[in-house]
Amino acid sequence: MKPTYDPNFPTVDDLRTRAKKRIPRFAFEYLDGGCNEDVNLHRNTADIRNVQLIPHYLSEHTGSDMSTRLFGHVYDAPFGIAPVGLQGLMWPKTPEILAQAAFEHNIPFCLSTVSTSSIETVAEITEGQAWFQLYHPAENRLRDDLLKRAEAAGCPVLVVVCDVPTFGYRPRDIRNGLAMPPKMTLRNIMQILTKPNWAMQTLLAGQPNFETLKPYMPKGLNLKELGQFMSDTFAGRVNDERIAPIRDMWKGKLVLKGLASEADTERAIKLGVDGVIVSNHGGRQLDAGESSIKPLTRIAAKYGHQLTVMMDSGMRSGPDIARTLASGAEFTFMGRSFMYGTAALGSRGGNHTIAILKAQLQQIMEQICCETVADFPNHLIRESQQPPSVGSTVD
């Protein structure tokens, strides 16, 4: 699909600015914030942008192709749409909008267990090409049923979340009543009244719900009861004993998301998974941890020949994607960037965001004379190659 975008919003930062104006503050802060003091939220992007690339201007260059083979499928670009919970809270029908855009642009869309569209709806939109992200249920019966539904829907890849053993401590969500159990405050209601377009679109679309989980939820739950249901339903913490039976049951590709160490990657390899997504949940779980790009470089270098190593967290542009691929990732995923797109532009947001990222990444590839995605590491300036900073001495 030829990338076309609205020139009024040529960057993800432009989309973020418009999104902030278009949706209630509690919804924007749920999307935009990290945990605790937001240290790792900002470190994610800052560390990515410390990565530098070198151009090869005098080499023979016949053109750049960003298509990427991943798990047997050739995608049009080396990035996909990461799973995000409560997507319809930020803008109505967001998972459907993004799934459709991903399908049209031939990139992967991954649906979260706790998003606001069902496995079956997204599978129909994507003709069975969407991935499914599993939050591990406390009961094996529910786990097994979700896996059967994902298999029946044709999902080629199952992504198991590993980095939510506890809910992150998110001060904004606590103040806004979006912690568990959630509550609607007078302040939230006043914020909704200041965003009439969002309120009208939400009214037309219907109150956002956990659509995939609806068959398992008692009818008529109030917000407090909903919070208790979510707390009782999901175990959060995963380990070898919980992943091994999933590997046995799931016949498609299996990916673990949220790993951030060599030790966990070694365990993943022993469990027979097909890939890992190095991630710190977008800085929403552990403020005292590393940025995602740091463990990515080590994991890719040590284990990239044994399984597929991917990354999310912190990328906001085509150059960020290029830096991450050069650092060893075979594929990348972004969540907030696409959510800013739908919050800013509604039904146009998915196509627009994919288009600007494709255009930015294509420009980077042409500029540095990088012909394929696999060639990005050859353009990485490693730390030993970087010039000394001003005022430093060299022995």
Image: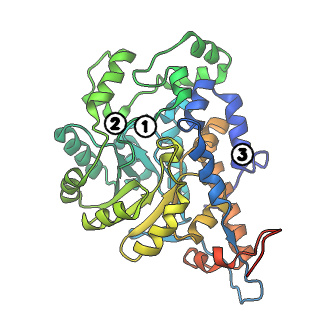
Answer with mark 1 or mark 3, whichever residue precedes in sequence: 3
User: In the drawing, does residue 306 fall left or right of residue 366?
Assistant: left
Q: Residue at x 50, y 26 (%)?
A: 205
Disc 3 + disc 2, Cβ < 8 Å: no
Front of the two marks 1 and 3: 3
CA distance for labels 3 and 2: 31 Å
Q: Which mark is residue 283?
A: none
Kindly identify which numbered label has been placed on residue 13.
3
Would you call the spot at circle 1 few (<14 residues within 10 Å), some (14-19), or many (20 or more)?
A: many
Q: Residues within 10 Å of mark 2 (few under 14, many from 20)?
A: many
Amino acid type at image mark 3: Asp
The disc, 2 or 1, on the residue closer to the chain's N-terminal end is 1
> Which color scheme did the rendering employ for the protein?
rainbow
* Earlier-in-chain disc, 3 versus 2: 3
Q: Position of residue 300 (x, y in %)?
A: 46, 70
The residue that mark 2 highlights is 212
Say which quadrant the C terminus sits in: bottom right
Q: Which mark is residue 115?
A: 1
Q: Is residue 211 left or right of residue 360?
A: left
Rendering coords of residue 163 (x, y %): 39, 47
| 3D distance between C-alphas at marks 2 and 1 | 8 Å
Q: Nearer the viewer, mark 3 or mark 2?
A: 3
Looking at the image, which is closer to me, 363 or 47?
A: 47
Q: Secondary structure at mark 2?
A: helix
Asked whether residue 130 appears in the rendered view, the answer is yes
In the rendered image, the quadrant that contains the N terminus is: bottom right
Three-letter code for the amino acid on which mark 1 is drawn: Ser
Label pair 2/1, CB-CB below 8 angstroms: yes
Question: Viewed as shown, does residue 76 lie left or right of 19?
Answer: left
